[in-house]
Image (spheres, rainbow, N blue to C red):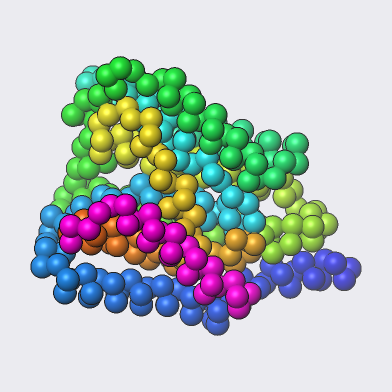
Amino acid sequence: MATLTDHRVRRRRWLELPVHHQQRNVAIIWALLALLIVVASILSPHFLSQFNLNNIVNQSAALMLVSLGQTFVLLTAGIDLSVGSTISVVVTVLALTVRADPLSIALAVPIALGVGAIVGLGNGLLITRLRIPPFMVTLATLSIGQGIAYQLRTTPPGVLPREYSPIFLGEIGPIPIPILLIAGVTLAAGMTLRHTRFGRHVYAIGSSEAATRLSGMSTDRIKVAVYVLSGLTAGLAGAFMAARSRAGDPLIGQPFAFDAITAVVLGGVSLFGGRGSVYGVVAAVFIIAILSNLLNLLGISSHYQYILKGGLLIVAVMLYYRRA
């Protein structure tokens, strides 16, 4: 009885966090984003141009998708290092399969989601059935996926038809599709975590998997589901990147695993699980995208972006985990 009571207390923890610690973290990261926008607009007169703002949104969309999927995984105290290679596999597969006919283009997104779901399902089953740590499983599937992407690469690399790009880069009325995509996925993720039983189970597993299991909940099923979700968002991000690049580049997904983990941690999600919000992650993704964009506008070498991202990750760990 005491164990079940402790478990219920842990499950209620998330409902109490927004009033204090959680809301404060989200407010801090959004304040940093606002400050960065002001500084960037002062440093570069082109920063607030319509063209550049659209460019920032386009740069953010794929990372936003991957980061939101990674959020679910980290909330269960897991990690998914395979998202980058999943994107690379999706892009190379689409470069081989998508043609200019309407049926081929209509099947592109389902194919991308299918590839991502297969990778995520494989990760989840290996972690839950064989009890292999998530880091090792997803590190292995990262390598496997990257090898598959190289194997699928054609010489010269495959090129997607122009007719495919408007699926992700067009507009619905006056609103660019990437904005609708970011808003829709963010809202869905936030509502799922905050207002559904599945979301409460995700937080409960991250807070204490042992107590959650003792309460009768199928923790393995939830963990498989979050890895499938991470695979789906990586697959959708791959479809988006294919629309942007229109080339079957097997290296296109390499930065995403590190960038997504940086965004999620900077956004206030605990690497130990059980604590965090998608809304902080959204702000963190825009911070990373704006910093990269600003360096380009100022003519600073892109090599410094890697140094900057590493520094951001260290700062995030110092801010959130020293107190924890």
Q: Is residue 272 above or below residue 137?
A: below
Residue sitting at the far bottom: 20
- Point out residue 228 in the picture as x, y percentages from the top left corner: 56, 40
Which residue is nearer to you in this view: 131 or 309?
309
Q: Residue at x 74, y 37 (%)?
A: 129
Hey, which quadrant is residue 165 in on the image?
top left
Q: Residue at x 49, y 55 (%)?
A: 261
Does residue 203 appear anywhere in the picture?
A: no
Does residue 14 appear anywhere in the picture?
A: yes
Q: Is residue 217 above or below residue 12?
A: above
Q: Main secondary structure of the magenta part?
A: helix
Q: Is residue 158 above or below residue 212?
A: above
The quadrant of the image that shows the C terminus is: bottom right
- Point out residue 308 in the picture as x, y percentages from the top left corner: 37, 61
The answer to whether 13 appears left or right of 80 in the picture is: right
Q: Residue at x 52, y 74 (%)?
A: 319
Magenta residue check for 148 = no
Number of callouts in the render? Answer: 0
Q: What's drawn in magenta, residue-wise?
A: 298-324
The quadrant of the image that shows the N terminus is: bottom right
